[in-house]
Amino acid sequence: MNYFLQQSIELANQRDYLDQLFRVYPMSPDNIREIDSMKWQRFEQAFGNNRHNEIIQSLLDFDLFPIKDSYIAYLRRDKSAIDRNPLTIARICGRLKEMGLNKIYENLSQPKETNRQIGPLFKRWVSSGTLGLKPVSLDKFLSSTDNAILDASDATMKDYAQKYLDYEREKGLDFIARFNGKIIISEAKFLTDFGGHQNAQLEDALQLLRLPLKENVIKIAILDGVCYIQNKSKMNTALCTTYKSYNILSSLLLRNFLYQV
């Protein structure tokens, strides 16, 4: 088994893995959304005057809709449907009336789901300099052969990889670095549970490992979460069999990996 994969599994199963991982992925489920006062005032007036269409139109301006209803997504995508479907609008407004203003406000200000916070957290952690180098812009990355970590968006990293590394996927990357003349590229995933979407996230990261790229490129999958739990899950089985010889590691071991390249 790949040394860093083995070390990642041992870290997750024998040490304070989650406590350490919180430095990389500091979930903040209690940060409520800020409510735009002007949008709220518009809704409150429509609500007080019982103007059904305006109630729905004003609530669709918020990131969240205060109730779960299968028809809301349709109304978001075609707001002209509000005028054409009075019975549906009246039904939804009836539920809103039963809730009252306080509960509606509370639901509108619910924090973002933690899985939607995950994406930027890894790059924020890398940008902090915790890997021993402060990431640099693409211009600086290209103008030197020194060890460096690229500070760029997923799309810019994809463009760089397509231009210089024979990368052909239309998917962004999470990490690009240069150490000892080698280019290290990766996707980073925090797999919070087992199941369909999370399995797809894992497969997305693992596909990168199988791509044919230039000889000086080292492909790694930076994985964290339940994939390291030693059970008979699809995730752990894949890592310990099909991908056991590949460069797969926890973000907590990334610094060690870089400096041994």
Image (cartoon, rainbow, N blue to C red):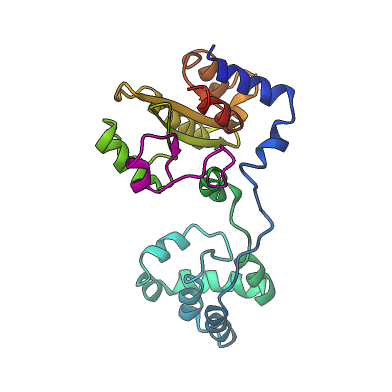
Residue 194 visible within the image? no
Q: Is residue 28 above or below residue 14?
A: below
Q: Where is residue 147, by image quadrant? A: top left
Identified at 46% across, 78% down, the residue is 53
Camera-side residue: 66 or 172?
A: 172
For the point 59% across and 72% down, the residue is 35
Percent from the top left, x then y, of residue 261? 47, 22
Left or right: residue 18 versus residue 85 is: right
* Residue 226 seen from this side: yes
Above or below, 30 against 14 in this view is: below
Position of residue 212 measured from the top left corner of the image (x, y, whole percent): 30, 22
Residue nearer the viewer, 95 or 257: 257
Per the rendered image, the range of residues in magenta is 127-150
* Residue beneath the point at 42% across and 65% down: 76
Residue 239 pos. (x, y %):
52, 19
Residue 232 located left or right of residue 204 = right
Q: Is residue 130 magenta?
A: yes
